[in-house]
Image (cartoon, rainbow, N blue to C red):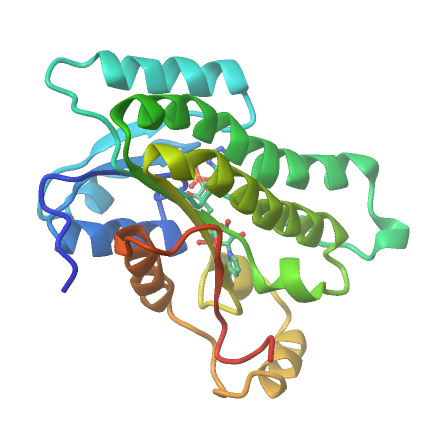
């Protein structure tokens, strides 16, 4: 198994779902975790970790608040820097384009894309100084193939892919690799809200005939975080949905 002993890993949106599974996989691999969410992370969630994680609580859409929180982290005595950043926090507000409010379009792009930038920039600056780092961004297969009712989400997740490629080019010379994961349909709160008929329709198009597990996305995140010669890539973890 990949060893992340003595590595510090920040996973945004790690209070539940895929983010929590990613954080637990890094914990199992020996990493020091920093969990993050908009709301307070429950003590019972923290208790599931081998090494008690630090926690951050802020809304990623506020660039100033994100920067303040990250600066405070680096000011802590003995803090040696973030080795791996996983930008996982994200939301959906689905609606057909003809009925979608401009506010719902903007808020999904604001959380998923602007929020990713707001967290990444202050950490990327520090990674440049420390001359190493790995960043893994959560895109979605919807960012590659589009989806009815998700113009806002698909635009934000396609944006993540362009963001990833550009940042990979900027970071490479400083020893920073940046990659993305494009999950398909993963068992989570986000997919549980889909009507049963919609879930059944989607299933018909998944060659491996099942939704994925959050732990399977986590495996791919650890792989990209550890690989030395992969950067600027988007790895689909989708049971073949996109092929
Ligand atoms: N589920 C899927 O099938 C699927 C497929 C493809 C891609 N993805 C992507 O994978 C990522 C995780 O998905 P998920 O299904 O695990 O989501 P989830 O269960 O809904 O969890 C979302 C996480 O993001 C946090 N978050 C949301 N808005 C935030 C904000 N403004 N500021 C700070 N934190 C915020 C939430 O914090 P709180 O708990 O405080 O609300 C929570 O920790 C997302 O980027 C999603 O787009 C998911």
- In the rendering, at what x and y percent does residue 226 appear? 25, 53
- In the rendering, at what x and y percent does residue 240 appear? 53, 80
- In the rendering, at what x and y percent does residue 125 appear? 39, 22
Left or right of 159 on screen, residue 6? left
201 or 235: which is nearer to us?
A: 235
Dividing the picture into quadrants, the one containing residue 242 is bottom right
Q: Is residue 224 above or below residue 13?
A: below
Residue 16 showing in the rendered view: yes
Residue drawn at 56 percent across, 83 percent down: 206
Q: Is residue 107 above or below residue 223?
A: above
Left or right of 119 on screen, residue 141? right
Residue drawn at 82 percent across, 57 percent down: 96
Number of dots carrying numbers: 0
Q: Is residue 151 above or below residue 207?
A: above
Determine the residue located farthest toward the right in the rendered image: 98
Residue drawn at 38 percent across, 56 percent down: 230
Quadrant in the picture for the N terminus: bottom left
Left or right of 240 on screen, residue 3? left
- In the rendering, at what x and y percent does residue 181 appear? 46, 58
Quadrant in the picture for the C terminus: bottom right
Residue 85 showing in the rendered view: no
Dividing the picture into quadrants, the one containing residue 204 is bottom right
Left or right of 147 on screen, residue 200? left
């Amino acid at each position: 198994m990949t060893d992340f002993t003595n590595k510090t890993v920040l996973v945004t949106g790690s209070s539940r779902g895929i983010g929590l599974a990613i954080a637990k996989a890094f914990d199992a691999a020996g990493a020091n975790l920093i969990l993050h969410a908009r709301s307070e992370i429950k003590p019972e969630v923290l208790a599931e970790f081998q090494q008690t994680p630090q926690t951050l609580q802020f809304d990623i859409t506020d660039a100033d608040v994100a920067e303040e929180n990250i600066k405070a982290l680096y000011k802590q005595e003995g803090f040696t820097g973030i080795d791996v950043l996983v930008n996982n926090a994200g939301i959906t507000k689905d609606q057909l384009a003809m009925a979608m409010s401009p506010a719902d379009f903007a808020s999904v792009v604001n959380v998923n894309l602007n929020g990713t930038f707001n967290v990444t920039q202050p950490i990327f600056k520090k990674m440049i100084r420390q001359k190493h780092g790995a960043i893994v961004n959560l895109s979605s297969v919807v960012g590659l193939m589009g989806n009815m009712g998700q113009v806002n989400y698909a635009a934000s997740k396609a944006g993540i892919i362009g963001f990833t490629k550009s940042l990979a080019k900027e970071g490479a010379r400083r020893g920073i690799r940046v990659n993305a994961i494009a999950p398909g349909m993963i068992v989570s709160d986000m997919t549980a809200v889909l009507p049963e008929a919609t879930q059944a329709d989607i299933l018909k198009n998944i060659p491996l005939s099942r939704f994925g597990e959050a732990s399977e996305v986590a495996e791919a995140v650890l792989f990209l975080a550890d690989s030395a010669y992969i950067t600027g890539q988007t790895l689909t973890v989708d049971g073949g949905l996109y092929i």
